[in-house]
């Protein structure tokens, strides 16, 4: 059975949750490998919309076990709220269905306070953080100050960690951020004792579970959050997230070797979007961008913020294909392009009058990049009822063919609407995964 990694190839919001949900009907394990509750996946099944922020999309499949791997940062209260929202639609998140790595770093109240105050101080230079404490929690992990899930089960040790961290954070908030917010170590300690009681049955050795599944020839799906162009190392820094979003990090976070990976799937919109600040070479700030936003309902699952919209960026997707070793692309939201007489593909970049082959490292240079476009014919037919490639209008098929040609990657499938049944797989390998049920 395969190990498949699913990643976004743009700036997030590509529809990864929908595709993971589609692939996980036969899956044994579905593993979220990075990020926190700053990224949401929306899945629609028979008209019912479910927004997931932490729990992998495979939770909607009754036979899949879902895991949060070591590279995730976890807000316990956000997770509890998500579990309760799933119970409201009769999906029980039991320890048999869901597990959390002991290495997971916890997001605590002081992380969220620091995140918000820093963003306020940036004023015109804001990064666009969701203020959910993601970045400060990852900072604690790297600086070896984190309180991890496994730390909750030794009260004496936990007390030492809490008192040390709260003292540091209070001093930082007051002296550096000039903020009046201060935290009580006793309150946070008591809160974490309750968290420990709630989540102890869920704590598991994710690396060991993944290893056993691989050796037992089971089907394992790794689910990323955000997109490759938001990667902390390879994205449009500093307008990036705080974790590595590329496929290779699934191995690091999940605790297994790269030789076990069978396939990497890239999820890609038929156009481009971005939330918040940061360079966006193919952004369309005119009527076409507004149309893409309105028709595509481009508003953040977590934040509700309107997404910036623009045309398909070939060079950016080429970069993501290279960074992730992507085998095939799933093109989502193809139906949103219906109604345009002409479609644009951003096929090249120009900087200071010269063509360049890749995004520059400096965001100052990226902001000056000009996208060069190729126009192709659009289509007017409603394609939301399409269920095969042959049913697509010829112009829509030509669009997919041209994207494959210029990006240099096969198209493994496409979607023509938000529902689970509006996803069409073309790649024989992908169909074989879906047929494993």
Image: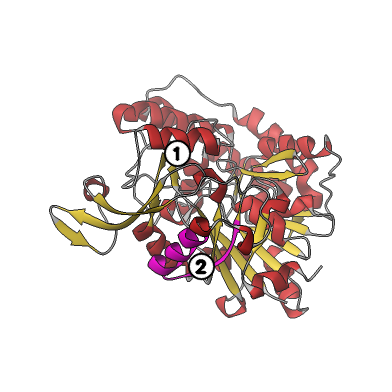
Q: Residues within 10 Å of mark 2 (few under 14, many from 20)?
A: some
412, above or below 399, in the image: below
Q: Quadrant of the N terminus?
A: bottom right
- In the structure shown, which secondary structural element does the residue marked by tag 2 occupy? helix
- Residue positioned 62% across, 68% down in the render: 426
**In this picture, residue 436 sits left or right of residue 234:** right
Q: Quadrant of the C terminus?
A: bottom right
Q: Position of residue 342 (x, y in %)?
A: 39, 47
Give SS at disc 1.
Answer: loop
Residue at the (70%, 63%) spot, across then down: 206
Q: Position of residue 56 (x, y in %)?
A: 69, 52
Q: How many marks?
A: 2
The residue that label 2 is drawn on is: 248
Residue 146 visible somewhere in the drawing: yes
Q: Nearer the viewer, residue 408 or 249?
A: 408
Say if residue 101 shows up in the picture.
Answer: no
Residue 347 x %, y %: 32, 59
Q: Could you tell me how far apart the alpha carbons at marks 2 and 1 are, in whole angstroms?
A: 24 Å
Q: Relative to residue 390, is residue 300 depicted above or below?
A: above
Q: Residues within 10 Å of mark 1 (few under 14, many from 20)?
A: many
In depth, the one of 284 and 115 nearer the eye is 284
Q: Which residues are magenta?
A: 397-414
Residue hosting label 1: 275
Foreground mark, 2 or 1, reads 1
């Amino acid at each position: 059975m395969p190990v498949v990694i699913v990643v976004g190839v743009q700036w997030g919001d590509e529809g990864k949750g929908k595709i993971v949900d589609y692939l996980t009907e036969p899956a044994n394990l579905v593993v979220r490998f990075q990020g926190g509750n700053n990224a949401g996946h929306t899945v629609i099944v028979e008209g019912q919309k479910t927004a997931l922020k932490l729990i992998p999309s495979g939770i909607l499949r009754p036979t899949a076990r879902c895991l949060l791997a070591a590279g995730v940062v976890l807000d316990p209260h956000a997770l509890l709220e998500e579990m309760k929202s799933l119970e409201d639609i009769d999906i029980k998140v039991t320890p048999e269905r869901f597990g959390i790595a002991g290495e997971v770093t916890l997001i605590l109240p002081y992380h969220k306070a620091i995140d918000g105050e820093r963003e306020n101080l940036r004023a015109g230079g804001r990064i666009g953080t969701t203020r959910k404490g993601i970045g400060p929690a990852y900072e604690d992990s790297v600086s070896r100050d984190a309180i991890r899930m496994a730390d909750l089960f030794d009260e004496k040790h936990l007390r030492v960690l809490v008192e040390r961290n709260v003292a540091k954070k209070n001093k930082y908030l007051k002296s550096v951020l000039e903020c009046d917010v201060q935290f009580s170590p006793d309150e946070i300690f008591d809160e974490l004792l309750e968290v420990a009681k709630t989540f102890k049955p869920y704590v598991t050795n994710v690396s060991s579970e993944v290893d056993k599944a691989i050796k037992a020839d089971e089907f394992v799906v790794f689910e990323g959050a955000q997109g490759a162009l938001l990667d902390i190392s390879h994205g449009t820094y500093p307008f990036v997230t705080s974790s590595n979003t590329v496929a290779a990090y699934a191995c690091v976070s999940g605790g297994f070797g790269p030789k076990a990976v069978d396939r990497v799937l890239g999820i890609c919109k038929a156009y481009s979007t971005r939330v918040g600040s940061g360079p966006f070479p193919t952004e369309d700030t005119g009527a076409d961008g507004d149309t893409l936003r309105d028709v595509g309902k481009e508003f953040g699952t977590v934040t509700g913020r309107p997404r910036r919209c623009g045309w398909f960026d070939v060079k950016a997707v080429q970069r993501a294909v290279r960074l992730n070793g992507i085998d095939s692309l799933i093109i989502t939201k193809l139906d949103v392009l219906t109604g345009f007489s002409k479609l644009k593909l951003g096929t090249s970049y120009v900087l200071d009058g010269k063509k360049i082959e890749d995004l520059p490292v400096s965001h100052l240079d990226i902001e000056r990049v000009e996208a060069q476009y190729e126009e192709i014919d659009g289509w007017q037919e409603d394609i939301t009822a399409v269920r095969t490639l042959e049913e697509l209008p010829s112009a829509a098929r030509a669009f997919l063919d041209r994207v494959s040609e210029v990006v240099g990657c096969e198209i493994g499938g496409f979607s023509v609407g938000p529902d689970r049944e509006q996803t069409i797989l073309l790649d024989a390998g992908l169909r074989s995964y879906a047929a494993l049920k």
